[in-house]
Image (cartoon, helix red, strand yellow):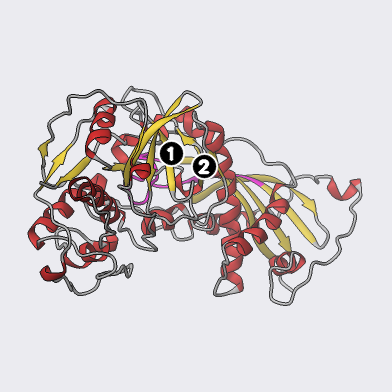
Amino acid sequence: MAPWLQLLSLLGLLPGAAPAPTKPRGAGAEAWGPPSPALLEPARFALEMYNRDRAPGTQAVLRAVRGRVRQADQGSLYSLEASLEEPPCNDPTVCQLPVSKKTLLCSFEILDELGKHMLLRRDCSPVDTKVTDGKNQTLSSVISLLNKGPLSKDFSMQMLSVFKNFLTTYNRTYESKEETQWRLSIFINNMVRAQKIQALDQGTARYGITKFSDLTEEEFRTIYLNPLLREDPGKKMRVAKPVGDPAPPEWDWRNKGAVTNVKNQGMCGSCWAFSVTGNVEGQWFLKQGTLLSLSEQELLDCDKMDKACLGGLPSNAYSAIKNLGGLETEEDYSYQGQMQACNFSAEKAKVYINDSVELSHNEQKLAAWLAKKGPISVAINAFGMQFYRHGISRPLRPLCTPWLIDHAVLIVGYGNRSDIPFWAIKNSWGTDWGEQGYYYLHRGSGACGVNTMASSAVVE
């Protein structure tokens, strides 16, 4: 049996498999041997795993490697330190941060049993990072913090048991044994990253296992996020008049009947549509006193200025609603999670809008506007949200820069927890993510660009 199959079988991850007893290991089995001359083969395997799913022209090459090997029950466990070199990466749809990476120092942990390799850990840190944030603070110190730190020797084996629980909790199955192996390696790497995001967060948020924990960063961004938000400022809207009243200490439109249940965009980058319908639902409620769940699918199908599951802009969506003649309800035009032929009927439209407005970048003014006028459509940088579980998120600014916004959401309220100010944000990833589908983000610091693209429809 292949080595990774033995491990999965040991944990009962394969059909019909039952956990087998483990052998006690003496002190000799735990000792690390001298550097092995056979490091090149596992290093090449690690490089192959690093480059997997990376676009041509962005793949790294191996420059140097050193390491140690420990004898396991039926094979060897390699701990490698490798120097990789990759071409500059300036494409924001590929790179998480706008960093031109040149040389990376990586730590790999690879299990080799019967000549078959399995990647248990990958941890890479760029050596030369020159990008700065808006205050000329270099990212190098932050990136090194995010990527440094050795794992305990037993961490990878513990993760196997955690992965089994993840599969059960989220009813996850894969098409092949090879896919199971690959998803396990991604899961382990993601758990390491979640721990480091946790260590660097300045709020009270907790990060860890979510339903997205078996996806690579590239997969998560491609499927669930919206790159158009940072690529195109969209149609210029008129600026809303500020409200005269100061912001109350706290406010929550969920308690006042203006917010529908959390929805789920599925495997489609349609967050822009959910952000806008949520805003229009609130505006209609405030004007007409009726809360209706409105159709996102209508926007996917009929808004020809946007790109359906490939992303869109709230400003375009407002224009589409106005030009179409309104929105149908979710009941009449149900969500399918993919673009289809436009089936809008003006006779079935239940809601209309007259205009749309751009809101202030000042968060105090945003809070005052929200308390008087209703939930607000905003766009944010989704850094860390792949692993967010609960609490008030406040990532370091260089990691969650306001110029890399890639996700549209809906602010429904604000307040304080233990004297920490927050925005209450309705997301569109279902109730099995975050705090029953909600995300709480620090208020008052421009966290993750939350104040850079705030807008609302106007219903008269």
* Highlighted range, magenta: 80-102
- Assign the N terminus to one quadrant of the image: bottom right
Locate residue 194 relative to residue 260 in the image: left or right.
right
Residue at 45% of width from left, 52% of height from top? 217
Looking at the image, can residue 121 be seen?
A: yes
Q: Identify the element where label 1 is drawn.
A: strand
Measured in 3D between alpha carbons, the distance from the residue under mark 2 to the one under mark 1, in whole angstroms, is 8 Å
Q: How many marks?
A: 2
Locate residue 204 relative to residue 443 in the image: left or right.
right
In this orientation, which residue lies closer to the viewer: 283 or 157? 283
Does 94 lie within the magenta span? yes
Looking at the image, can residue 406 be seen?
A: no
Q: Position of residue 150 (x, y in %)?
A: 66, 38
Comes first in the chain, label 2 or label 1:
2
For the residues bearing labels 2 and 1, Cβ distance under 8 angstroms: yes
Q: Position of residue 23 (x, y in %)?
A: 89, 59
Disc ID at residue 440: 1
Q: Which image quarter: residue 152?
A: top right
What type is the residue that disc 2 sits on?
Answer: His
In this orientation, which residue lies closer to the viewer: 207 or 456? 456
Residue at 17% of width from left, 72% of height from top? 342
Q: Which image quarter: residue 42?
A: bottom right
Residue at 23% of width from left, 34% of height from top? 372
Q: Main secondary structure of the magenta part?
A: loop
Q: Position of residue 43 (x, y in %)?
A: 61, 54
In this orientation, which residue lies closer to the viewer: 44 or 271? 271
Say if 101 sits above or below 360 in the image. below
What type is the residue that disc 1 sits on?
Answer: Tyr
Q: Position of residue 185 (x, y in %)?
A: 60, 57
Please name the residue that numbered disc 2 is placed on.
Answer: 390
